Image (cartoon, coloured by chain):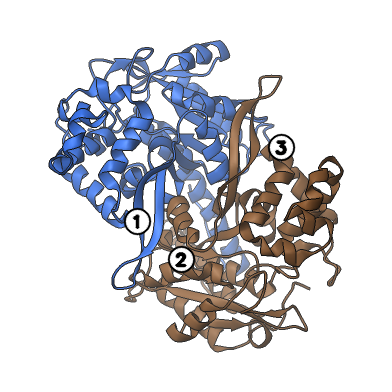
Chain colours: A brown, B blue
Amino acid sequence: MTIFVRRAGKQTWAIALTLCIFFAFQSVHAATDLPSWNNSSAREKIIAFVQKVTHEGDAGYVKPEARIAVFDNDGTLWTEQPAYVQLVYLIDRIKTLAPQHPEWKNQQPFKGILENDLHAVAATGNQGLMAIEHAADAGMTTDAYQANVLQWLATARDPRFKRPYTELVYQPMLELLDYLRANGFKTYIVSGGGADFMRPWTEKIYGIPPEQVIGSTDNIKFERNKQGQPQLIKQGAINFIDDGENKPVAIHRYIGRMPILAFGNSDGDLPMLQYVSSAPGTRLVLYLHHDDPDREYAYDRKSSFGKLDKGLDEAREKGWPVVSMKTDWKVVFPQ
Amino acid sequence: MTIFVRRAGKQTWAIALTLCIFFAFQSVHAATDLPSWNNSSAREKIIAFVQKVTHEGDAGYVKPEARIAVFDNDGTLWTEQPAYVQLVYLIDRIKTLAPQHPEWKNQQPFKGILENDLHAVAATGNQGLMAIEHAADAGMTTDAYQANVLQWLATARDPRFKRPYTELVYQPMLELLDYLRANGFKTYIVSGGGADFMRPWTEKIYGIPPEQVIGSTDNIKFERNKQGQPQLIKQGAINFIDDGENKPVAIHRYIGRMPILAFGNSDGDLPMLQYVSSAPGTRLVLYLHHDDPDREYAYDRKSSFGKLDKGLDEAREKGWPVVSMKTDWKVVFPQ
């Protein structure tokens, strides 16, 4: 590119403006790469969708403020096997607290934790998971809880990959998040995991700030400590489980407008995908299929965590892209 | 300003970048006016605060992503007398539905509505208000509800000012919202009013998008209509009343980080102001005092709507700016 500028004044401003626009265009263009994605039909559909909604004049054009994209977290942005990371965190914490709670030896899901029987724990479902979380957290300030999560993540390592859990995020999904944001999208997490568990680290790892992280919540109470300082105390009771049919409810409650893209990996994401795909206008909903036992895991219809059964059938029936981890991705985790 | 550009290449890019920065600086500077504010101590404190948090190198500097400002709505951004606007909307709707509900003649708060006895309605408090809202809305889709709100606002007029309610917003507060946003703030509403009631119009009127409007919520349910289309149905039951000690809880739950500025007008905002002002770092919390019976209303310690009693004492004790509508504002409503 060669531009010759010979005079000052209005012309300089016009050129400056042109260059600003050029810079902006360049940054959008450069981000379209999705370098860790193979040149598959899923990648093509994503790029075609983004080009459509960002191309002013196209019938499918969407104004930037309405470019909302929602992502499940467990199994969609990071690994959820052999158990949800939040559950691993809680197991560690429950084991630490167990000597003060002898009754847990005969009470699920605590019994399962103490006996290292994850199937028994998983059988108690989201309710069980949240019960554990709250047994572990009740009475903590929200600040202390979040500090505790960060401290644990700094030292905990996944037993198979020997890496911190925040490194077991999917490189192609990190690129997709970046690509969408470079094209004016606002990226949200809509997860069954605890909002307080995710928010301390999602900005650094995914570029998703706390106010765009929607998750399960517990009751918290405004109190004053002995010095009269206001603080928020976790009450040890479930307020909202952000899974299944609650995901569309949470989207309405927290965002208040219909996303145009939704990405999930389990039946717990199906109502969210149905909700987003049913709205009028240009929409894209996708499933990630875990079919890569060598580089990550292979599971779907019978898994305790992240079961994908009805969703897989509905995706095939409706033509939603099903991303194959094995064939669509060049790499799984960041190097 | 005169800039002479004689050669193309790297130098042109450097100048373009300089001009981009200059443009950005200009837009921030021009917005500092707050033209409808008299040159009072409250205005000075606001401007000094914003200069402090935006001045890189200042000990009180705050990064743009943490510049969160929260505003109450009723009585802080728009008028709440002689009754909350949402209550006026609900009164109209209840009167429309009343023939189908003969039991309402003997049941508060409905009795009060049908007899035009607003004091009796007000006496039932937030619980009563929400009971009315839900009697009016149960079974509606969220889309139908929001369309209904917009339709009502388009024709309803305030009896004293003979203007649409969305014109009874405070011009100096609109300027403050703009001023903060021009300085990199993200502006939020944290209101006792219904989120579904506010979100259809807050972007147009205040420049605050739906995802930054936090309010009271009702239970909603994901269902499918006869054609199998997903929809969200209002259930007629209160989920969360975003008032008093629930406001800090809502801030944590929806935003997930501590605001640096909070603005309210009633005792219902006091915990929010205490919460924000107690956090370490540069903070500003303010009260609006309604002391202008000629241009708007004068009320505080004994009002049914927007009572300001404990908050007024605490503001004076702690030195929080109390904005006088009468002496600090040149105009109240937009021309």
The residue under label 3 is which amino acid type?
Met
Which residue, given by chain and number where applicable, does mark 2 sit on? A18
Marks 2 & 3 on one chain: yes
What SS does tag 2 mark?
helix
Q: Position of residue B304 (x, y in %)?
A: 32, 19
The residue under label 1 is which amino acid type?
Ile
Does residue A146 appear in the picture of this structure?
no
Please give the name of the residue rendered at 26% of the width and 21% of the height, measured from the top-left corner: B120
> Depth check: A312 or B67 in front?
A312
Q: Are marks 1 and 3 in contact (CB under 8 Å)?
A: no
Q: Position of residue A121 (x, y in %)?
A: 72, 61
Q: Position of residue B94 (x, y in %)?
A: 20, 39
Other residues around mark 2 within 10 Å, as few (<14) / some (14–19) / many (≥20): few
Marks 2 & 1 on one chain: no
Chain hosting mark 2: A
> Depth check: B229 or B284 in front?
B229
Q: Position of residue A105 (x, y in %)?
A: 81, 51
Q: CA distance from mark 2 to mark 1?
A: 48 Å
Q: Is residue B191 above or below residue A130?
A: above
> Depth check: B60 or A105 in front?
A105
Marks 1 & 3 on one chain: no
Which residue, given by chain and number where applicable, does mark 1 sit on? B233
Which residue, given by chain and number where applicable, does mark 3 sit on? A140
